[in-house]
Image (spheres, rainbow, N blue to C red):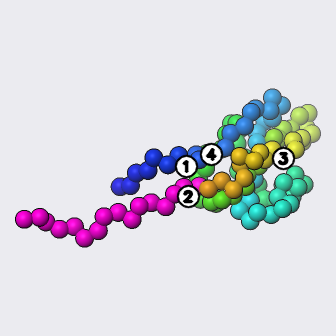
């Protein structure tokens, strides 16, 4: 078993959009300069879709990634999206945290 008191980020959260029915999460692990524009134009693959105002990271999510959220709703049969929301706090999020200690080796008895 290993323990750490390092506060690794558990996810991202945002204030609710009162008109949103769900939120589309996008992630960029490549530092693409056009990430927000490509997500906004529908040319970046959707990572997840949630109805809550938070996304908790999964073990499969990339380290050191940029994240953004777009609000989404269908109103009277018409689909709407917000502009991308990608604050500075969501850039290059390191999910790995710190390297663990190597741990003790070569156990032996003391006589």
How far apart marks 4 and 3 lie (CA) works out to 17 Å
Nearest to the eye among marks 3 and 2: give it: 2
Of all residues, the one furthest to the top in this rendering is 18
The N terminus: image quadrant: bottom left
Q: Do the residues labelled 2 and 1 touch (CB within 8 Å)?
A: yes
20 w.r.t. 92: above or below: above
Q: How crowded is mark 1: few (under 14 residues within 10 Å), some or many (20 or more)?
A: few
For label 2, the residue is 96
Q: Give the range drawn in magenta.
A: 95-111
How far apart marks 4 and 2 lie (CA) works out to 13 Å
How far apart marks 1 and 4 lie (CA) works out to 9 Å
* SS class, disc 2: loop
For label 3, the residue is 84
Q: Residues within 10 Å of mark 3 (few under 14, many from 20)?
A: many
Q: Which residue is drawn at 66% across and 59% down?
A: 64
Q: Residue 11 carries which label?
A: 4
- Residue 10 in the image, given as x and y percentages of width and height: 58, 46
Residue 40 visible in the picture: yes
For label 1, the residue is 8
* SS class, disc 4: strand
87 w.r.t. 110: above or below: above
Check residue 107 for magenta coloring. yes
Circle nearer the N terminus (4, 2): 4
């Amino acid at each position: 078993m290993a323990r750490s008191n390092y506060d690794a980020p558990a996810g991202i959260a945002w204030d609710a959009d009162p008109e949103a029915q769900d939120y589309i999460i996008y992630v960029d692990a490549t530092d693409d300069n056009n990430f927000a524009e490509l997500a906004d134009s529908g040319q970046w693959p959707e990572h997840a879709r949630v109805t809550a105002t938070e996304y908790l990271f999964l073990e499969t999510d990339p380290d050191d990634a940029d994240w953004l959220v777009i609000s989404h709703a269908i109103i009277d049969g018409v689909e709407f999206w917000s502009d991308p929301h990608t604050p500075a706090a969501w850039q290059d999020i390191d999910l790995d945290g710190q390297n663990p200690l190597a741990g003790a080796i070569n156990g032996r008895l003391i006589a």
